Image (cartoon, rainbow, N blue to C red):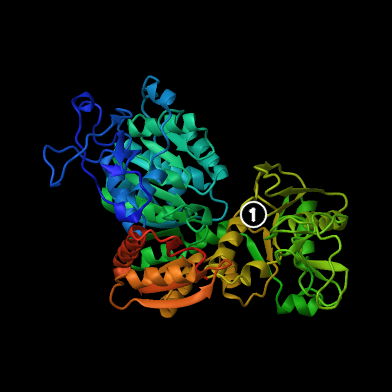
Amino acid sequence: MCVDSPLPHLDRPFDYLVPDTAAGTALPGTRVRVRFAGQLVDGFVLERTAETTHEGRLHFLDRAVSAEPVLTPQVARLAREIADRYAGTLSDVLRLAVPPRHARAEAAPAATAPDLGEPAAVPADGWARYTAGAALLRALAAGRVPRAVWTALPGEDWPARLAEAAATALAAGRGALIVVADARDLDRLDAALLRILGGPGRHVALSAALGPAERYKRFLAASRGTARIVIGTRAAAFAPVAGLGLVAIWDDGDDLHSEPRAPYPHARQVLLARAEQEGCAAIVGGFGRTAEAQQLVETGWAIEVGAARDELRRRMPRVLTVGEHERSRDPQAAAARLPSVAWRAARDALAAGAPVLIQVPRRGYLPAVACADCYTPARCSHCSGPLSLPAADGVPSCRWCGRPAAGHACPECGGRRLRAAVIGARRTAEELARAFPDTVVRTSGRDGILDAVPREPTLVVSTPGAEPLADGGYGAVLLLDTWAFLTRADLRGTEEALRRWFAAASLARPAAPVVVVADGGLAAVQALLRFDPAWLAARELADRRELGFPPAVRIAALTGAPAAVAELLSLAELPAGAEVLGPVPAAEGQERMLVRTARSAGKALALSLRAAAGARSVRKAADPVRIQIDPLDLL
């Protein structure tokens, strides 16, 4: 059995005797309680055998918590693989994979699959617009295992396409598992499946937003085989699906797919591992493309599914940049937040009765301010965090500690006046309301996300990821403050900028103007102009391969107190050719070291670091070290 212990040196199965009273309930996959290191702890039964290889004395398990087998052999094997890849423990991964037990939900009578009759024929027109799209559906219908990286067309109803793929797998007698980034995408996918499958009962939606009882109830529907299609956010990647035939992930570049708890697995990697272990089909889809997805294509693991250029030209918007031509006509255009070309695009769209989308990178009013005299960034006198202004007549406060800074004085020049360093969504809405006084201005962001806007002249100011759908599409899309994405000191900065821009631009009507306030010579802007995310993904992958960054290599980031990190490295038997980089400062009193190795040695690197962490736990080392494999915040 697997004992629920976070200590890495205890990451192995332990044998227990099963008393006669639990012989019929302590079956593989069930929860039990055992005495371990003097305490009663939880665990999962992995296997029942008649003999043991342990030479010492065995203890009896304390009791069987439930006779419900919630850990299938497939998920147990997957959890072991993910733990080994990410230098984690099996118990840590199982904590992510299996939701907490809810006795009332478990005791309720098992739901039976509703008699919905035969599902309607799955339409193939949507996938037929893509090269190899129709072939992908045919392969799923035949029970084969196609693997594809899908680049969706602008304006594509992607929930319907994924629902069609899942329904095709179901019609072939196999299950499907689809993972999306957030609750909004999950609701859209849920509605598409209800429409295509003819009603509820054939699928379940899993997310952390559900209450514990409802979440566990839906989990049981999947584990008992009542629901053969499971959709959900990142934790659903581990969901038990009977006869799994298809795994899919939408927008794999979204950082919400990365688990913030140890061992920090990425949902894309979990699904790819499932595809390998269970021999099923896989789809990695999005409007953009990550370097990781591009690598799947270049290595031959997946085929490329995209539209022909003629079809793309019919569907794509018209992308405009603030380049040399615009600067010659309007010398102020390069410095203006809303250059004349953007203003004209918005005016014309509103006059035609269409809504206009304005994407700004930052929320709030003025998320960063600076001295009005010398332009020195304004920082908190207590924690050195950046000061922000919540409203035009508000008092500046620290974004880190929340302390007000009404009497702030610039440490460089003594000035007390502040100016905007970064402009947020609410301030942008104010400016647009003055520029278009007869037009309704709405905002969508953390304070309130709009699901959809009607087909009427409206200005919609949105932060990335909160863009509402527009009935009939937007008449124009404006991408402002693009420097905030392009100047990020981040390995994935360019890729992330393009992903955000594609997500917004894909909401525009065909041939509608999309104005990006950036130099047209930049690689990300060039990819947007062509509407060709594969081109930039191939370029990014080539650059990372040359420089030695993921996904071309494996990198482990070790963060902790300097002495603790040094001790861990001294105990680790790193694979041959491993390169240690750093240290670089991290949080206060901590540092970060990087260990780089070839992709083929990635698992050996993770196992060596976990073994070293286990040796430190045996020594009862006080200072922990966080181990992350290929973290998103690498730089």
Q: Position of residue 433 (x, y in %)?
A: 84, 53
Residue 535 left/right relative to 170:
right
Q: Position of residue 227 (x, y in %)?
A: 38, 32
Q: Say which residue appears at 71% left-offset and 56% top-offset.
A: 363
Q: From this viewpoint, is residue 302 visible?
A: no
Q: Say which residue appears at 44% left-offset and 79% top-offset.
A: 547
Residue 395 left/right relative to 171:
right
Quarter holding residue 105: top left
Nearer to me, 360 or 77 = 77
Quadrant occupied by the N terminus = top left
* Count of all numbered marks drawn on residues in the image: 1
Q: Say which residue appears at 59% left-offset and 65% top-offset.
A: 497
Q: From this viewpoint, is residue 229 visible?
A: yes
Residue 499 left/right relative to 481:
left
Q: Say which residue appears at 29% left-offset and 27% top-offset.
A: 67
Nearer to me, 220 or 466 = 220
Residue on which disc 1 sits: 508
Mark 1: few/some/many CA within 10 Å (<14, 14-19, 20+): many
User: What secondary structure is marked by label 1?
Assistant: loop
